[in-house]
Amino acid sequence: MSADQRGPLAGLRVLEVAGIGPGPFCGMLLADLGADVVVVERIEAEAQGRGPQAIFNRGKRSVVVDLKKPEGVEAVLSLAAQCDALIEGMRPGVMERLGLGPDVCIGRNPRLVYGRMTGWGQTGPLAPVAGHDLNYIALSGALWYSGQPGTPPLAPPTLIGDIGGGALYLAIGLLSAVMSARATGRGQIVDAAIVDGSAHMLNLILGLRPSGQLVSERGASLLDGPHWYSTYRCADGHFISVGSLEPKFYQLLLTKLGLAGDPSFANGYQRRTWPELRAKFSELFAQRTRAEWCALLEGTDACFAPVLTPEEASVHPHMAERGVYSNADGVLQTSPAPRFSETPAATPRPMRREPDVSAVLQRWTSR
């Protein structure tokens, strides 16, 4: 096994039809964990910022194919016949028009898992229309609890939809279907829609609804309204976060802040007190710098963390000791995750371009 094929997915062959967003990220995740991911790309991909140096292409190999020509389509089908899974992120119907739909590909390889990554899904009234991460999580309900009352809902770009509800669900879908195919000999289609995945992620907080801890009013639920579960601006313009959800952690936070005996905070779990206490917390945290609050609260069970930029996070002592970030060829990026005790992943390398499809097939068929 070569040095770039270590990891728990070593030996898994994945064909990725070049695209943008969650599909390539899913391919990167699989490559990080040792899968042999080959990207079918267009000649102009590098000019569009999707070439070998793109972080989401690390650990992969690529081959340039002209899908407008019959011989190009046949070349992709020859690759599909030799791999375990295929990833595509086109609008519904595009792969079929190219002659590379699931019926054709699985016809060549009955064990193939055909992964389809879209925002709206393969079916439904919105399936054929354009959209982006923000639209998908807005429709799925995942965006609703982001932000405070009176402010527009706002979520971190791409993380909830493209990555959480999209790429990660496609990855688990592909791996589940590959396991099934190895047991039964039958491949299948994996329809990974961001609206499905981002809605599914809501189940953790939807479980709070029967107890009344989750309501439809923004800012009035356990995880989006309390003063002890929020972010605050400091004296230097930086931000910190507190998440003292459980009573014992909340009491420790109050003690650290010198508020343990303040009667205003005695009823901190009652919704009616949250706006007033949030205002008091805002005033208090604005009196010191982020570094001063870190000195007081970081490393305690008050459930505290500074809000860091990726650059700051990369050199934070905890993140640095774990090697969460790396700086490969001057590009800040994160290391493979999760971690494995027996089959650790290799250090990711930039994507390598193969001279042609025959070179990929020779490597695959020679094993």
Image (cartoon, rainbow, N blue to C red):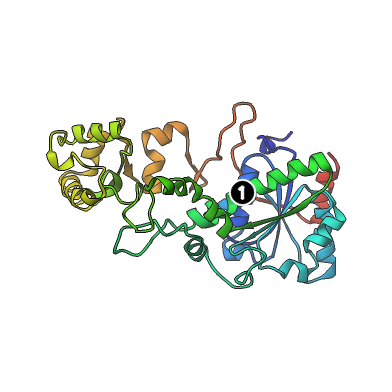
Q: Is residue 278 above or below residue 101?
A: above
Q: Residue at x 84, y 44 (%)?
A: 185
Q: Position of residue 118 (x, y in %)?
A: 62, 62
Q: Residues within 10 Å of mark 1 (few under 14, many from 20)?
A: many
Q: Position of residue 6 (x, y in %)?
A: 67, 34
Q: Residue furthest left?
A: 262
State which quadrant residue 284 falls in. Answer: top left
Task: Provide the secondary structure element on which disc 1 rests.
Answer: helix
Q: Position of residue 350 (x, y in %)?
A: 61, 48
Q: Is residue 193 above or below residue 326?
A: below
Q: Nearer the viewer, residue 71 or 93?
A: 93
Q: Position of residue 22 (x, y in %)?
A: 58, 56
Total labels: the figure holds 1
Q: Is residue 280 left or right of residue 175?
A: left
Q: Is residue 339 visible?
A: yes
Q: Residue at x 22, y 51 (%)?
A: 272
Q: Nearer the viewer, residue 24 or 164?
A: 164
Report the quarter where the C terminus lies. Answer: top right
Quickly name the residue at label 1.
Answer: 28
Q: Nearer the viewer, residue 221 or 151?
A: 221
Report the quarter where the N terminus lies. Answer: top right
Q: Is residue 231 above or below residue 151?
A: above
Q: Is residue 251 above or below residue 74?
A: above
Give, as a three-letter code, the residue at label 1: Met
Q: Residue at x 15, y 46 (%)?
A: 287
Q: Is residue 350 visible?
A: no
